[in-house]
Image (cartoon, rainbow, N blue to C red):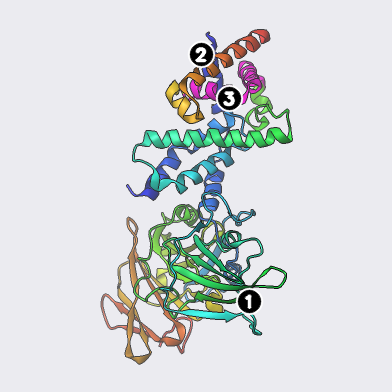
Amino acid sequence: MEQRDRFDVLFGQHASRLVRLAALLGADDPEDVAAEAFCRLYAARRRLREDDAAVVGYLNRIVVNLVRDRQRRATVARRDAHLLVPRTLPPDAIASHADRRAVAEALARLPHRQREVVVLRFWLDLPLGQIADATGVSAGTVKSQLSRGLCTLAEVLEEDR
Amino acid sequence: MSLEDRLRHALQDEADHLQVDLNRVRGLTEARVTAAPRRRRVWPLLAAAAAVAAVAGGVTVVARAGSPAPDRPPPAAGPHAPRAGGVATSFSCPHRSTVRFASATKDLSFVPSLEHGPRWFAAQMQAARFAFQAHGDTAVLRLGNADGSLGSVSTFSRTADGRWDAVRATKCVNGPYLADDPHRLGVLTSNPPFAEHQAREAARGCGTPTFVGGPGYYDEAGLLRHEWLYLASCAADQARLTVVIPGSGSVTATLSSRAGLEPADVGHLIPAGVDGKRGRVGLWALYDAHHSVAGLSAELKGGRSLPAEAVDLHGQQGTLYLLLAPRDEVIGLTVQPMRGAPVKYSSQNPPGYRQ
């Protein structure tokens, strides 16, 4: 398959998922993040292996890094930016999904790194090794971040019950 | 329900409720991947020409579609930034021109500047590569294409207050067939990423657009650009010819096979102002929905003949004949039908050139 065709196929297969991943990680503009991720994929297309799993891992890593970078900048400008994007939680949807709202809000209170591993683990169902690859830390760090994140979530969600 | 299951459900629910505008994602990606040259001043002229062009000879300028070019600074850094080095030291293009800025030149289409550095200027020009060398009070900036071919060489001299002043610039310019030889139209390049999406938008209501190539041309900086031509067959023996302007928009013309054996003058799809002379290069198209045409050719001065590119629409009905030639060289056009005598058209009788 030609590189361009492969690129189009990857876009069709993963664009929606990447937008949703960026949204769950708290991106202000998840569609823009996904677009930027595909631009970087395009720029690196000649260096990519044929293995689609590696490409998907590469895309996940770009999105995680992009959201992280943007949040870092946003945090400098506005220290209280640790909330899920309002656009991802329309009021009517929130009203009908109380538990989702509670989880989303609890997730938004987590430190970025813990939120990343929780989303990658429980939304994408990634194993620890792939989460480590996407977040650029060791598997041990992923494990500890995940453990801390779950503890915090358990406390917060228990309080809400 | 365990905390883990609760998280899984909540995250999935959250993700499912997110409305994803894939067209926006594609548009954003497309605009960045195929960012249009900022200084491509010919295209607004083209768009304006398309907007006011009248219906003539079976050709109707239908629409100009697409989002405007992204309003953001050129990528002096990042994946689309110009790369330093790898630019040839000599020209491979057949036609060049030199502008000396110290003289009273009126050609200000390309004025090199080092005010913000060579990389910044290369990014402004959307050059894929650049090379910069300074020796004492003289500096040379070369802008190149992605394949390393040289587009322009600019020489600067340092002023008393330390600034660099442009002295002269030599750049590639378009020849009689723009940047290409006359026989390559239609097989120039592969389908550019995402231009197809724009073509599909422009051809809404018709069949799937087929990439038919398009002429390459040199921009004001001497860099090689391409326009992307697509054809989609529509109802009632019509086809929509679309020129995609990456990251900016598209211009379309509808060709009607019912015009019979009369080629349509679609020169307005050529970037206006290329080489400063609008309309110097002609483009003719003939859409044959029923395979009743065997060929189209131009008779040039000096007894030469130039055959049109024939592009079959894969999976669709019809064949497109495209002919690119310098207008002042063309004496007439000849259509050879499948049956019967050739039909000749003369340039003395525009726009159909019927003799």
Query: Residue at the location (47% across, 60% down)?
Result: B85
Q: Amino acid at mark 3?
A: Arg
Q: In the rendered view of the protein, which quadrant contains the C terminus of chain A?
A: top right
- The residue furthest left is B339
Image height of B82 relative to B267, above or below: above
Task: Say what secondary structure mark 3 lies in.
Answer: helix
Report which residue position mark 3 lands on. Answer: A113
Q: Chain of mark 3?
A: A
Report which residue position mark 2 lands on. Answer: B5
Q: Compare residues B76 and B39 and report the one nearer the observer.
A: B76
Cβ–Cβ under 8 Å for marks 1 and 3: no
- The residue furthest front is B136
Front position among marks 1 and 2? 1
Report which residue position mark 1 lands on. Answer: B108
Task: Say what secondary structure mark 2 lies in.
Answer: helix
Q: Compare residues B123 and B269 and report the one nearer the observer.
A: B123
Query: Residue at the location (59% across, 11% down)?
Result: A151
Query: Residue at the location (43% across, 24% down)?
Result: A129
